[in-house]
Image (cartoon, grey):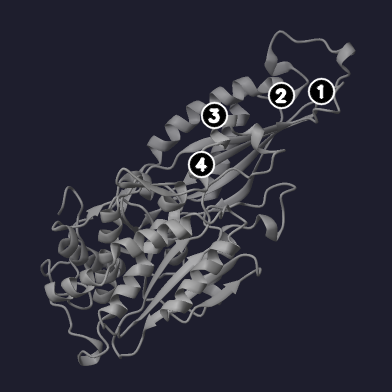
Amino acid sequence: MADGFPLLGAAAPFTVSEADRAAVAAAIDRDELVELALALGNIPSPAGHEKAAGDFVYDWMDKEGFSPRKVGATPERNNIIGTLGGGGLGGKNLLFTAHLDTESPTWNPDLDPYKFRPETLKNREWQECWLEDGVLYGYPIANDRGPMSCFLIAAKALKTAGIDLAGKLYLTACPGEIGPEPIEEARGLAYMGKDIGAHYLFHHGGVAPDYAIAAEGCDFGVTWVGCGYAVFRLKLVGESVFTPLLTHPEDPAQHPNPIYRLGGLLAALNAWGREYEVKNRYESQGGIAVPKTQIASIRGGVPYAFGAGTEICCLYLEVGLSPRQRVADIQHDLERLVAEGGFGEIEVEPMVVRHGFEADAHEVAPLVGALDAATRLTLNHPIQRAAPVYSSMWRDHNVFNMQRIPAVTTGFKRWRPSPQDMVDSALIYALAALAICGRADGPHGGARAAPVYGDNPFGDA
């Protein structure tokens, strides 16, 4: 156990030696890695506009000999898939994935002023990356083209070191991990997110992984727990009254205009959200999930068609879902809240639903063993369980755990990584890939690893 993290005990499928570490480390060019991350990170790639970044990854893979393919629901939003190895019997297949899109404003001047301050919109880190004072700046480096660059260079280092993998290594870059989600009039393919990214890749990308790693910043920790989320629309229904005829009631809860009823509802939702994250905290060997809630938007009336208030006001509530939760339970909770609160007529409906997932501890153990061995060889300490925030959000390891492919998320320092952080992460990825895939020139694809942590690989959850 390392700092409270219960290592699962199962050995990686194949051993990795100090000689392997030295050979792969020598093949990682720090300057090349940083230059790749900066070049890729400085391609604007907000959700829905990933084509240029995807084309860059495709061209890089093609130049480096990874035989890339494009697989997309639309030609503008392809998944890029490269491969390495697969030339020996007995090796396991490992898939790396990272997403091409990065969080940002919509860049629609008619929308962004209703969500962001002017100075926030001017923040250059939305779409620019640079190296300054020994660390890397820019949201695209942090999320997620920095980790993507690390596994691309990891694969190149394995090739440069002359290591032929027995199992197949899939290198994938996907659109849509951040979003968006089709809601209300924002409908159709243009607003698709996760459905056309790693989810589409799994079903249509010609991949057959035994294990998967979502390469994302985790401060070098690991988790195989992931939260999902739902977005609930709470529609407050009232009565339109011509303003000169309106009589304001003393109690806002009795006002015919439903916007006036928001005050009590907001206070109730705030109290509910505070209790929700405590009541639904979930902890397992694989991580700690603390699902949280936040109001995303409020819409009511038409500002230029004034004169009689509005009959409709909609509140959109984001609700995190741990791997043990189901959306129907939240629906019942919210219906009970609005019924007991005396807020008038309110309709509750989930507009988006994505459940959370968790890998089976027994099945994911060899992958965790591979990452632990790689971390020990690289950082000289055991791997640790990632901080709860990394288990409390959606990451694309959820897609593979959903499909019964044991998957984790792991990667370098999430914020302001140094070039050395990136090199260390690339080395961990490369050594973990070798520990999973094995050598094509070894017996049956590689030397079988001996158990590392004792006879009981799983201990007490």
> Would you say the residues marked 2 and 4 are in contact, meaning their CB atoms lie under 8 Å apart?
no
The x and y percentages for residue 97 are 43, 66
Q: What is the distance, in whole Å, between disc 1 and disc 4 at their CAs?
A: 40 Å
State the residue lying farthest toward the left. 454
Say which label, 1 or 3, has the lower sequence index: 3
> Would you say the residues marked 1 and 2 are in contact, meaning their CB atoms lie under 8 Å apart?
yes
User: Measured along the vertical axis of the image, is residue 175 above or below residue 282?
Assistant: below
Which mark is on residue 259?
2
Residue tagged by mark 3?
269
> Would you say the residues marked 1 and 4 are in contact, meaning their CB atoms lie under 8 Å apart?
no
- The answer to whether one can see residue 357 in this image is no
Which mark is on residue 237?
none
Say which label, 2 or 3, has the lower sequence index: 2
User: Residue 108 occupies which quadrant of the picture?
Assistant: top right
Viewer-nearest of discs 1 and 4? 4
**Which residue occupies 19% across, 75% down?**
23
Q: Which secondary structure, mark 2?
A: helix
The x and y percentages for residue 58 are 51, 72
Which mark is on residue 309?
1
